[in-house]
Image (cartoon, coloured by chain):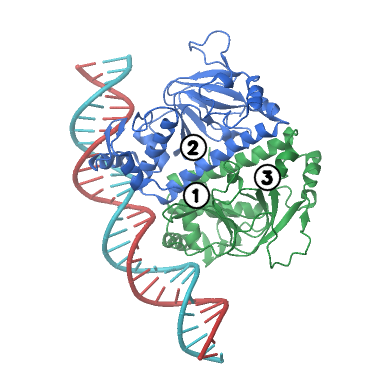
Chain colours: A green, B blue, C red, D cyan
Amino acid sequence: MSATAFHSTAPRCIAIEPGTAAPAAAVKTQCSTCHLRELCLPSGMNELDLGRLDSLKFTRRKVKAGQTLYREGDKFTCIHAVRSGTLKSSLMLSDGREQVSGFHIAGELVGLDGVAQGQHASATMALEDTELCAIPYAGLSDATAGHSGMQHVISRLMSREILREHSLMMLLGSMNAEERLAAFLLNLSHRYAARGYSEREFHLRMSRAEIGSYLGMKLETVSRTFSAFQQQGLMEVDKRHIRIADLAGLKRRFEVRVH
Amino acid sequence: MSATAFHSTAPRCIAIEPGTAAPAAAVKTQCSTCHLRELCLPSGMNELDLGRLDSLKFTRRKVKAGQTLYREGDKFTCIHAVRSGTLKSSLMLSDGREQVSGFHIAGELVGLDGVAQGQHASATMALEDTELCAIPYAGLSDATAGHSGMQHVISRLMSREILREHSLMMLLGSMNAEERLAAFLLNLSHRYAARGYSEREFHLRMSRAEIGSYLGMKLETVSRTFSAFQQQGLMEVDKRHIRIADLAGLKRRFEVRVH
DNA sequence: CGAGTAGTTGACATCTCTCAATGCCGGTGG
DNA sequence: CCACCGGCATTGAGAGATGTCAACTACTCG
């Protein structure tokens, strides 16, 4: 049904992707020196806790465009933090229907849904060549045990994931096509802006079908809605390149805040 | 827009509802003697951790039908565990649109979305007279600090909430009206069965409008879909009383498992 | 008893989906 | 080098599902 296929093997998070340019010894990363530390796992931690995090030295991992990071049912061992690139997570129904449940960019965490059952409930695939930090969940649990501030940060991250899903539910449950696409674009714009990129001009890494799956509409409807926005003078659309001409107007018409 | 209105005051979780039959001294509850312990907060804990939980002695709290437990924006201090009764949680858009994000019955936890920002992102209202345990989040954090098994249980509960929202997203994003309503009823049936109630016959505590809001459809469509199920011989529907005549058939036609 | 709430049903409108044709682009192989 | 192919996006026409509006009934509460 979906245009995209899962054709990679499903390596574990401890393994280094074979065939990548990674040196023989795994590249290790410390949070305290990472330019994404304000957005990512350490967000909200104090210096002391950040130091504790550093002792974990996370392994880096590369995933090429089209390859999966994990599939549904895979054993859950690691949370992953995106260093660069873009991923999509999706849920699969027994009859083959796919629903994209999220897109992830630099500084975002992937895989928190695996904690509940010790195995992943979704599959996650790279939409472009992507680099991540593999954060072993067991190691993280040990490191945070006894440090309630640090523990609270983890809980906050999980709760934040719940909030993220709230807004998607809102979107899927009570918005029409234009509102959905506008909410999606405004959300992306916001996330890019937080990372220092342009909030008005960006390149979509996902297909119309993937956007549609995420927003609960068909790819043709996505395409038509893009065209409608363009005709309304709200933005210029050239395939995956988006330039928002009237960001304020877009917000005025479509920014529906939750409470 | 919505048929339901918020007309209660919004008491804090430490307070005892005025005017209820609760004795002067707050009723305290220990998890180890609770008949819901297998389903609720202690689910998956060992004896030792359960003992630690007992030392917290949660305050009971009653909320009458139609009253709110908390509203969006309220300070988050407690998670609540449902002892008896039914609640709904809902999200509000700035333009007044409401989306029900969940229904909660005995043994389920309410309010985990507040952890992220220290304030509630949703509002929660009792659909019938309801009794809860108020679980102060700070106290819980302290009690679990240093006990990674106990901490992991909390994380699991949050992750479980993420999974719950996953299936709702799946439902909202890629199912038609019959599938949505069937999935909702099968889910309810399952939850009642786990609590020792009939899986075939139950009383809905929520209106057609509330079901519709939860499932992303209008109340008339909910009503029509109930009628369709009845005509198909799948169930008998009398207002809010449901008797599933052909549970196997309902499952066969509509049970779409995630992976 | 009257008003208000909840649920059902019908008729029609509207939105999104479905199916189909076309164009564009990049990669590949003759 | 160019023809061809596959994947992605756009657009049109018509179908189908759900929303909207309205009428009616049953029930509850004051």
* Image position, residue A211 (x, y; %): 50, 58
Residue located beneath label 2 in the image:
B92
- Disc number lying in front (1 or 3): 3
**Mark number, residue A43:** none
* Image position, residue B219 (x, y; %): 33, 38
- Disc number lying in front (2 or 3): 3
Q: Are marks 1 and 2 on the same chain?
A: no
* Image position, residue B249 (x, y; %): 31, 43
Element under disc 3: helix
What is the crowding at mark 3: few (fewer than 14 residues within 10 Å), some, or many (at least 20)? some
Task: For the N terminus of chain A, give its image quadrant.
Answer: bottom left
Chain of the residue on which disc 1 is drawn = A
Distance of label 1 from label 2 (alpha carbons): 15 Å
* Numbered disc total: 3
Up-down relation of residue A92 to residue A227 (above or below): above
Residue located beneath label 3 in the image:
A137
What is the crowding at mark 2: few (fewer than 14 residues within 10 Å), some, or many (at least 20)? many
Picture quadrant where residue B255 is located? top left
Amino acid type, callout 3: Tyr
Of callouts 1 and 3, the N-terminal one: 3
Is residue A174 found left or right of B153 in the rendered image?
left
Residue farthest toward the front in the current orientation of the protein: B47
Is residue A175 visible from the viewing direction of this image?
no
Amino acid type, callout 2: Met
Distance of label 1 from label 3 (alpha carbons): 38 Å
Element under disc 1: helix
Residue located beneath label 1 in the image:
A254
* Image position, residue A57 (x, y; %): 78, 50
Chain of the residue on which disc 3 is drawn = A
Distance of label 2 from label 3 (alpha carbons): 34 Å
